Amino acid sequence: MKTLTFSACFALGLFASSAHADAINTFKTLCFENAGSVAAIRKAATNHGFKVNKLGKNSYLGTRASTDERVQINVFTKHSFECAVTTSDMPRPRRISREFLKSLGLNGNKGRARTVIDGRSYTVLHDTKGGEAFVIFAD
């Protein structure tokens, strides 16, 4: 019984690790690499299997049936630009925050960092309230 319990916990750990790595990679590919360009993010999201729906002026929500990920572009934001990839809660949020920032080549504190892309300042963060959200925004 102990072997079965260990195996199940190990498998769940690998699944969670893979799931957050996938969400981070989705964020990097869609939001980070196309920061500031709503059109480029929409195109990249569509190319990666997201169904992107317009919510309002320059505001979009994308869902993908094959994963538990959503991409949000300028959805209910006070910022001049915002892109987020969201997914369900994952274990070890502090570890995920460190891995997230490290994957982008950033150093930060408490899942938040500042960066400059093409001369524009952005804030990048990992928000764990109500699921996981990997976010980039500019004011």
Image (cartoon, grey):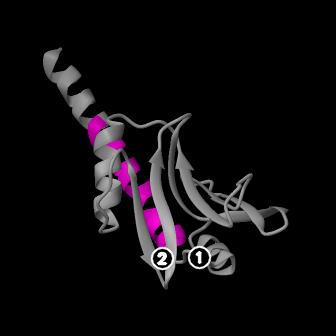
- The residue beneath circle 2 is 33
Q: Residue at x 71, y 55 (%)?
A: 78
Q: 127 above or below 84?
A: above
Q: Could you tell me the amino acid type at mark 1?
A: Ala
Q: Secondary structure at mark 1?
A: helix
Few, some or many residues within 10 Å of mark 2 (<14, 14–19, 20+):
some
Q: Residue extending furthest left?
A: 3
Q: What is the three-letter code of the residue carrying label 2?
A: Glu
Residue depicted at 28% across the width and 37% down the height: 13
Q: Quadrant of residue 77?
A: bottom right
Between the C-alphas of marks 2 and 1, the distance is: 10 Å
Residue 96 appears left or right of 36: left
Name which quarter of the figure residue 64 lies in.
Answer: bottom right
Residue 46 position in % (x across, y down): 65, 72
**Earlier sequence position, callout 2 versus callout 1:** 2
Query: Marks 2 and 1: which is nearer the front?
Result: 2
Specify whether residue 22 is painted magenta.
yes
Magenta highlight range? 13-32
Q: Where is mark 1, residue-wise?
A: 44
Counting from the top left corner in percent of width and height, residue 108 is at: 32, 55
Left or right, 3 with reference to 37: left
Q: Main secondary structure of the magenta part?
A: helix
Image point 25% across, 28% down: which residue?
Answer: 9
Q: Are marks 2 and 1 in contact (CB under 8 Å)?
A: yes
